[in-house]
Amino acid sequence: MSAPSQHIVCTHCNATNRLPVERVQDAPKCGKCGQGLLTGQVQELTDMNIAKVTQKNDVLTIVDFWASWCQPCLIMAPQFKEAASQMPTVVFAKLQTDRYEQAAAPFNIRSLPTMVAFRGGQAIGRQSGALSAAQIMQWVRSLPA
């Protein structure tokens, strides 16, 4: 019987990687391009990979929907980055809604910034408004396992 595994989408090359659950803590790299999969850094999403990342990632994935004209979004950006660095086994990603309007549309974003949590292709949580890094981490920890 094989060990349980999780799928993680590489935001650099869009490849889906299968990773044994016990290796999630080991700074895994993409089998196709060699880039880090769980780096503790915020990944930039585009219209080319948002659907795959939100639908195929089995690991907890937090997407910050933001816009370049949104002052609260700009204020929260360094806080989001700090939370990502503190939670390296969670994928933290951003989608710029004013650049990728059609890609953001299916997520029914009504205010900015809005963070949506995904796991295994399902939205499992949503939080609107600018938060501090500590508040973001608290919200992430409160999500269903």
Image (tube, rainbow, N blue to C red):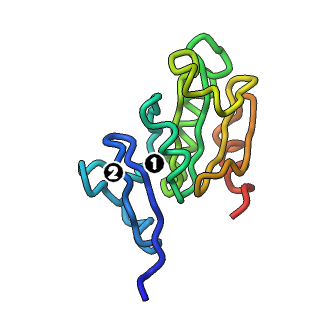
Q: Callout 1: helix, strand or loop?
A: loop
Above-or-below relation of 51 to 100 = below
From mark 1 to mark 2, how far is it between C-alphas? 9 Å
Foreground of the two, 89 or 4: 4
Pointer 2 local density, CA inside 10 Å: few below 14, some 14–19, many at least 20: some
Residue 8 placement (x, y as % from top left): 44, 56
Residue 77 placement (x, y as % from top left): 57, 28
Pointer 1 local density, CA inside 10 Å: few below 14, some 14–19, many at least 20: many
Give the labeled residue for mark 2: 36
Look at 67% across and 43% down and name the residue there. 136
Look at 75% across and 32% down and name the residue there. 128
Residue 57 placement (x, y as % from top left): 51, 54
Could you tell me if the residues under marks 1 and 2 are in contact, i.e. CB atoms within 8 Å? no
Q: Callout 2: helix, strand or loop?
A: loop
Above-or-below relation of 91 to 2 = above
Label 2 amino acid? Gly
Q: Quadrant of the N terminus?
A: bottom left
Look at 58% across and 36% down and name the residue there. 80
Label 1 amino acid? Gly
Give the labeled residue for mark 1: 40
Question: Quadrant of residue 113 in the image?
Answer: top right
